[in-house]
Amino acid sequence: MSRMFGTDGVRGVANEELTPDLAMKLGQAGACVLSKENQHKPTIMVGCDTRISGDMLANALMAGACSVGANCVFVGVLPTPAIAYLTKKYKVDAGVVISASHNPVEFNGIKFFDGNGFKLPDALEDEIEELIKNGLQGVKFPIGAGVGKVKYRTDAREEYINHSIKAIDSDLTGLKIVVDTAEGAAYYTSVEALKEMGATVIPIHNVPDGTNINANCGSTHLEELMARVVYEKANLGLAFDGDADRLLAVDENGREVNGDQIMGIIGCYMKKKGKLKKDTIVATVMSNLGFFQMGEKKHIHIEQTKVGDRYVLERMREIGANLGGEQSGHIIFLDDNTTGDGLLSALHLLEVMVETGKPLSELAKVVNILPQALVGAKVPNHKKESYMDYPEIAEAIKALTAKFAGNGRVLIRPSGTEPLVRVMIEGSDKELIETEARKLADLIQNVML
C-alpha cells in the first residue's frame, strides 16, 4: 500500500480520494499523536483556502478531533503561513491547513503543523497513518464533558497581517503593484497588507467563489498578470498560489522573476546588511545553474537539498540558515515564520526595491537564468528509483553529463508523486537542451517499460 502522506500532506480529489471519512480519521489520529505528550486537553487550530470542499473537510476533521477529546479553533480562510504563525503564537498543540495549494479546485489536501508551526517530520506522519490503518486501536473516545468543542475566530487574519508588516521597515508609498491572488487564500491578507504600507494596489483574481481557485491565474499562470503590469505601467506584479505560501513576481516590463531570482535579490541585500546567517541560502537541486553561479560571484554559499520545501526547511534548521527556498517560489524566512510565506517574500522583495531605488528588472539581473528543459519519462512506479541499474541508461547519462560539463548541467531524478523519471538539462542553447532531454527521456521510458 502506498504512503498516505506525500511531500506536502495528504492530497487527493475531494469527496473521492480525500473523503470526509478520511478527514475525520486524520482529525482523530492527528489529535492523538500530536498531543500524546501532554496531560492537558489538546487544542488544534484549523484553517483552509477558498475551495468549495474546504468547509466539508474542515468540519469532518474537527468532528474527528473533538471525538477524541481535542478542542479546535477554526480561523476560516487564511494562507498556510498564517496558520503556521498563529499555531506557534497561540501555543496550541497543532495546526491544520485544508488546502491543495496550486492544484485545481477538485483537489484538496490536509497538512499538519506541530505546536511550533513546523511541518511534521516523516516519522510523525507515519505514526498518524499507522494509527488510521490499525483502525484507531487503543484510542479512547470520551463522553460527556470529555468531548471537545469548536471555537470560531474571525480576527486571526488581522494578526497575521500585522505580524507580516512588522517584518520590514519600509514605506511603500509611490509603488503601484498588480496583485494576483489566484482566487485563493491571499485574496484579503496580501491586498490589505500592501495597502496598509502605502502601496497603490490593483488586485486581480481576488473574488473567490469556491470554484475558481487557481483557474488560469496565480503563480502557475502569469500571462494575464504580465500583460496587466505593462498596461497599468505598474512597478511590478505579484502572483500567489492558492494557499499563498508561494510567490512569483513580474517586473515592470512584464517579465517573470522566479523564486531563484527573488532569493538572489533578497539574499544579496541581506548579506550586504549583515543579516544573512552563515552567508548561506538553502536551495534545492532544481534551482537554476545561474543561481549557483550567482552564489559563487557574490560569495554566498548555496546549500543544496532534494526537491521539496520541507527538506529546505529541515536543512535550514540543521545548519542555522535563515533564508531558503525553491525556484517555484516557496521561500522561507526563518527569522519571521516557519514555512514558505508568499506575503513575507513580497514584502522583503519590495523592501529591496525601496531601499535601493532600483527597478525590479535591474535587480533581477543578479541571477542569469539559463534555459532549462524538463521532460518526464513515464515508467512503472515501482521501478522509478532504479533507473541507474540499466547499463544503457547509465551510459547515456554519463555521456550527456560529459557533453554539457562546464557549459550546463544534467539532473535526473524520480518524481516524488508520479510514475515518472524527470530529465532536466540546463544550457545556453535552448533548442539543443530540449532535443537532448527528449532523447534521453525517450530512452529511459523505452528501456524501463
Image (tube, helix red, strand yellow):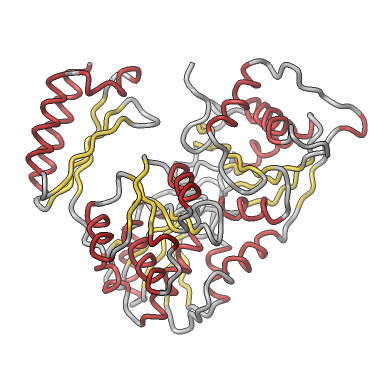
Q: Compared with residue 380, is residue 245 higher up or lower down, i.e. above or below? A: below
Q: Compared with residue 207, is residue 427 higher up or lower down, i.e. above or below? A: above
Q: Residue at x 11, y 44 (%)?
A: 405
Residue 265 place in picture, x, y as percent? 34, 67
Residue closest to the eye, 433 or 12: 433
Q: Is residue 427 visible?
A: yes
Is 100 situated left or right of 306 in this image?
right
Q: Residue at x 42, y 60 (%)?
A: 278
Q: Residue at x 65, y 15 (%)?
A: 134
Residue 157 place in picture, x, y as percent? 65, 60
Residue closest to the eye, 275 or 127: 275
Q: Compared with residue 288, is residue 43 higher up or lower down, i.e. above or below? A: above
Residue 59 image-quadrant placement: top right
Q: Compared with residue 322, is residue 115 higher up or lower down, i.e. above or below? A: above
Tag count in the figure?
A: 0
Q: Can residue 230 be seen in this view?
A: no
Residue 256 place in picture, x, y as percent? 29, 61
Residue 128 place in picture, x, y as percent? 63, 27
Is 435 situated left or right of 85 in this image?
left
Is 364 situated left or right of 145 in this image?
left
